[in-house]
Image: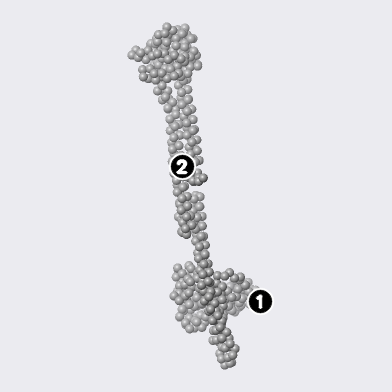
Amino acid sequence: MRWPIRLQLLMPLLVLLLGVVAGSVWTATTSADRARQRIENRVRDNARSLEKSWYPLDADNVLRDIKLYSGMDYLVVRKSGSVVHTFGQTVPAPTPPGDPVFDDANQLRLGPRVAVNHKAYRCSGLRLLKNKENQGNVVYILYPDDELQGAVWEAIWPVLLLGGALGVAAVVLAVVVSQRMSSRMHALERRTRLIAAGDFSPMPLPTRDDEIRDLTKSVNEMASRLAQYQETMRRTERLRLLGQVSGGLAHQLRNGVAGARLAIQLYLREADAQTDPAGLDVALRQLTMLETNLKRFLDLGNDKAVRPEPCDLVRLVGEAVDLLRPQCLHAHTALRWQPPAHVASIQADRGQLEQLIFNVLGNAVEAAGPGGWVDVQLTGPSIAAGPGENGTGSVVLEIADSGPGPPAVVAERLFEPFVTGKPEGVGLGLAVA
């Protein structure tokens, strides 16, 4: 069974409202009983006075004086059966209401409702037995019913008004609070549906600092992480697709490069001493590097274990500089590199580190262009030189060029495959690095 959040918020308030209503009704009933009891005590006190009176009550002038001071009407039935009352000569003598008639004023209660001259009264009868002047007579005390109802209403209306006002306020407050809470929860629900549909834009935070705001923050953080995961999956998919599409082509290129490298090696082996092998040696090293790059290109996207070993970083940087210097001479690009005096021995995967240095340095040469410059510096604390010695400290390789740098849009995705800011670039150098 579905239990909406609005009902969950409303039900406690409705239960509280029912309690307020029940309490108000009980208080109003109690107040009404007390008002009725006060009037009944007033009638009873009046009956005690009549019971002890020594003056005759069957005279018209006596009854009128008593009515003047008490505010009640009276009807006396003599022993002879004649009737005396305070309703005036124009009003016919009302019929005595009969029972109940009390013999003791302390037991007197408000009697039933009777009508005299189109006016309602509460009639209570008392038989006079204690005084010889009035002994045997029955006096009926008639209290105006409208005054009784007015006293009761005056006693209960403040309670009903206060209880009703509190009840209405509680209902309005409950509806408003539940509506606002429900609308905020629905907004979060819509946002999560958009996230499920692929929209990871952040949701505006509520102005009120409460649990809903914290929940909104959590939803925005979740959306941000999902966006990052989606971007990572896209990059991984690009790399996987790149490896699948280019595998065949790279395999063929590697075979051709291997054949060319073997041909140069054979020529150098058979050449006479007069031949200068420096240029061919650079070409052989370029082909070897190209073959290695093609092999790594074939392994792109595969998680291969890193095999650290002692490496001379100065030597690796120098080899990369030597491989790119002919390209710089051809393009009139100044490639400045001053090897440090000490050997920078580090633990690294030699093949991957060679590829990294060559790709980054090659990107710098291409970015500088004809007439530009590239500075290569190796800085850091002095490290103990010598084969097999393990130094301590850090080494920083800095490569700076005179190029304009990538555009801002490209800089954010510079290490993704096929992303490049150069017209002739492919966008794989830094991705492979």
Can residue 167 be seen here? yes
- Name the quarter where the C terminus is drawn: bottom right
**Which label sits in the foreground, 2 or 1?**
2
Residue 6 appears at what percent x and percent y? 47, 45
In 3D space, how far apart are the residues under numbered discs 2 and 1 (Cα atoms)?
Answer: 79 Å
Crowd tier of the residue under label 2, counting other residues whose Cα lies within 10 Å: few below 14, some 14–19, many 20 or above: many
Crowd tier of the residue under label 1, counting other residues whose Cα lies within 10 Å: few below 14, some 14–19, many 20 or above: few
Q: Earlier in the sequence, mark 2 or mark 1?
A: 2
Q: Is residue 36 above or below residue 289?
A: above
* 92 sits to left or right of 181: left
Residue 214 appears at what percent x and percent y? 50, 52
In terms of secondary structure, where does tag 1 sit?
A: loop
- Residue sitting at x 56%, y 76%: 295
Of residues 92 and 254, the one nearer the viewer is 254
In terms of secondary structure, where does tag 2 sit?
A: helix
Tell me the residue that label 1 is attached to: 388
- Residue sitting at x 48%, y 79%: 373
